[in-house]
């Protein structure tokens, strides 16, 4: 089955630790995205990548880092510099940037920093 | 990208049509209207999009007013599984640029048995 997978579904970390969230897609999509969602709020864009080995900051990139070494993978690292890392993190992909292509979302990872 | 305004919540009886409104009075001529929904603790799901004409697919219908300043998403026969937050998003479709979606707080649709 084609789709986007995120793991794990729930993640707990101690304050001050870096943590990496996984996102994999087998849809052969060029573009991938990371969003953050806080309770009762909409999604906010953290980083996006239009092509392998290239990525751009979104609206709230501070305290996060990404890599795009493979087309199918776009891991997100939440660093200790992120002041409020506890949130629901969503990964998405689309066939290409621009155009009218919709984004396909993964199931999300809920990160709790203790 | 234009800003959208949606009611925070709506109720609908199971089996009836759910009509979700969205205002986008500052929409530009090259901006599309998209609808997504998010069931609790899951990733958003694409529903439908349109530019000027009304659109219909297996999930819903999208009615866009002639001046394009507002639109309505119609779920023809709502079921309990349609209970979700529905997001209306307007976005320019342009080649080579980001496909960024700007999500507001959406409308929580509660389908009642």
Image: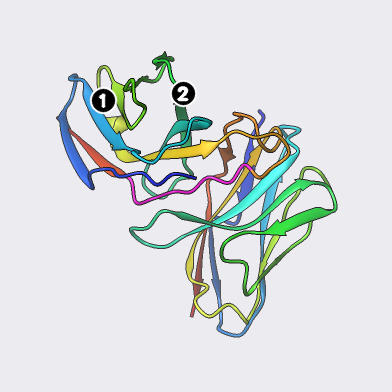
Of marks 1 and 2, which one's residue comes earlier in the chain? 2
The residue that disc 2 covers is B50
Residue A55 rendering spot, x and y as whole percentages: 76, 55
Q: Which SS class for mark 2?
A: strand
Q: Is residue A106 above or below residue A35?
A: above
Residue drawn at x 33%, y 20% is B66
Viewer-side residue, A67 vs B7: B7
Respond whether the residues carrying marks 1 and 2 are from the same subunit.
Answer: yes
- Magenta segment: B99-106
Q: Quadrant of the C terminus of chain B?
A: top left
On the image, the x and y values in percent for residue B41 come to 41, 50
The circle on residue B79 is 1
Task: Name the quadrant containing residue B7.
Answer: top left
> Numbered disc 2: what chain?
B
Q: Find residue A38 and report its horizontal and vertical position in percent.
A: 42, 62
Q: Please rate how many residues cluster around mark 2, counting C-alpha atoms within 10 Å: few if below 14, some from 14 to 19, many from 20.
A: many
């Amino acid at each position: 089955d084609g789709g986007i997978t995120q793991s794990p579904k729930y993640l707990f970390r101690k304050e001050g630790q870096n943590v990496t969230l996984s996102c994999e897609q087998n849809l052969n999509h060029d573009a991938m995205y990371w969003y953050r969602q806080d309770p009762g709020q909409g999604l906010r864009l953290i980083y996006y990548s239009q092509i392998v080995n290239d990525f751009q900051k979104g609206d709230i990139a501070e305290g996060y880092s990404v890599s795009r070494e493979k087309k199918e993978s776009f891991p997100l690292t939440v660093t200790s510099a992120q002041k409020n890392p506890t949130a629901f993190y969503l990964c998405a992909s689309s066939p290409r940037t621009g155009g009218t292509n919709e984004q396909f979302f993964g199931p999300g990872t809920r990160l709790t920093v203790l | 990208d234009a800003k959208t305004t949606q009611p925070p919540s709506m109720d609908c009886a199971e089996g009836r049509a759910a009509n979700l409104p969205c205002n986008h009075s500052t929409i530009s001529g090259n901006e599309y209207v998209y609808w997504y929904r998010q069931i609790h603790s899951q990733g958003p799901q694409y529903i439908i999009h349109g530019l000027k004409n009304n659109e219909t697919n297996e999930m819903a219908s999208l009615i866009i007013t002639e001046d394009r300043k507002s639109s309505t998403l119609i779920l023809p026969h709502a079921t309990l599984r349609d209970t979700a937050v529905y997001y209306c998003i307007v976005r320019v479709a342009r080649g080579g640029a980001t496909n960024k979606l700007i999500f507001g707080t959406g409308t929580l649709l509660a389908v009642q048995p």
